[in-house]
Image (spheres, grey):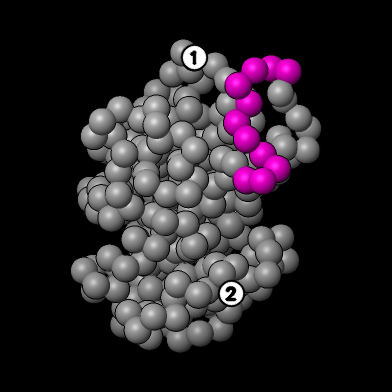
Amino acid sequence: MANPTTLIIGANSEIAKALALQTVHDNNKALIVITRDPSFYQQPSFTDSKVITLADYQEHSIIEAIDTIKAGAETLITNVFICHGLLHNQRVMPEKRLQAFNVDSFNEVINANTITPMLWLKNLVPYLSGKQACKIIIFSARVGSISDNKIGGWYSYRASKAATNMLLKSAAIELARSAKNIKLISFHPGTTDSPLSKPFQKNVPEGKLFTREFVASQLFKIVEESQLDGQVSFLDWQGKEIPW
């Protein structure tokens, strides 16, 4: 029988790296990572891991990556972490006011945070459907909660995460009928000490800036405790439900 395998997509984020290290060191599971930059995975810890490198995350590249997984030895994927996310880069910053809203920035954020994760989900589900329980975790954010929005701003980022949550809601309804072995989790990691959060860390309350190792450990606990209930769960790093 194939070894239980963890699949990490968008594996160059800080949390993804911590998930990968804990998978090979602590969880005694095989590991497949998909990334555009494989340099982190050249270290000895990942000698027995499968590293798939993509030039981009267009759908044809996503299909090729999944075909590569299919073509390998028998693989039993039990956990999938889709870690894509864009908050800022040289072209994009969260909008503090309505007048800062920009079409090009919005399209870039929505593509990274919403479209790309859904393309992975679309193309993975036919492969993962079956009898083996499989948890698929998509990285979201508390600011994607419409009812929790009390301060406004961050138009594109909020919208991208809210859109992802709605798409996952719809997908969960469908999978409850057609792929009952799959559990979806929309995950808010909190503020993690990473390049993504660096410009905003001065506003983080004491004790609320987490290491990537802490977040990865919390997430593994949440995944282990989650049940195949035909629902998508919107959870924070404590495992607490976030209002939609």
> Residue furthest toward the front?
202
The answer to whether residue 99 is left or right of residue 203 is: right
Q: Is residue 182 visible?
A: no
What residue is drawn where x is 68% and y is 64%?
56
Q: Position of residue 150 (x, y in %)?
A: 46, 13
Which amino acid is tagged 2? Thr
In this rendering, the count of numbered labels is: 2
Where is residue 241, by image quadrant?
top left
Q: Is residue 73 above or below residue 39?
A: below
Q: Residues within 10 Å of mark 1 (few under 14, many from 20)?
A: few
Q: Is residue 39 visible?
A: yes
Q: Is residue 80 above or below residue 88?
A: below
Mark 2 vs mark 1, CA separation in Å: 39 Å
What residue is drawn where x is 44% and y is 75%?
41
The answer to whether residue 30 is left or right of residue 207 is: right
Q: Is residue 4 above or below residue 203?
A: below
Which amino acid is tagged 1? Ile
From the viewer's side, name the closer residue of 15 and 135.
15
The overriding secondary structure of the stretch rendered in magenta is loop
Does residue 206 belong to the magenta stretch?
no
From the image, which quarter does the N terminus lie in?
bottom left
From the image, which quarter does the C terminus lie in?
top left
Q: In the rendered image, which residue does mark 2 sit on? A: 53
Q: If you read the primary sequence from the N terminus, does the residue marked by circle 2 or circle 1 appear first?
A: 2
* Magenta range: 89-99
Q: In the rendered image, which residue does mark 1 sit on? A: 151
- Secondary structure under the numbered disc 1 in the rendered image: loop
Q: Residues within 10 Å of mark 2 (few under 14, many from 20)?
A: some
What residue is drawn where x is 42% and y is 56%?
14
From the viewer's side, name the closer residue of 103 and 59.
103
Where is residue 19, by image quadrant?
bottom left
Q: Position of residue 42 (x, y in %)?
A: 44, 81
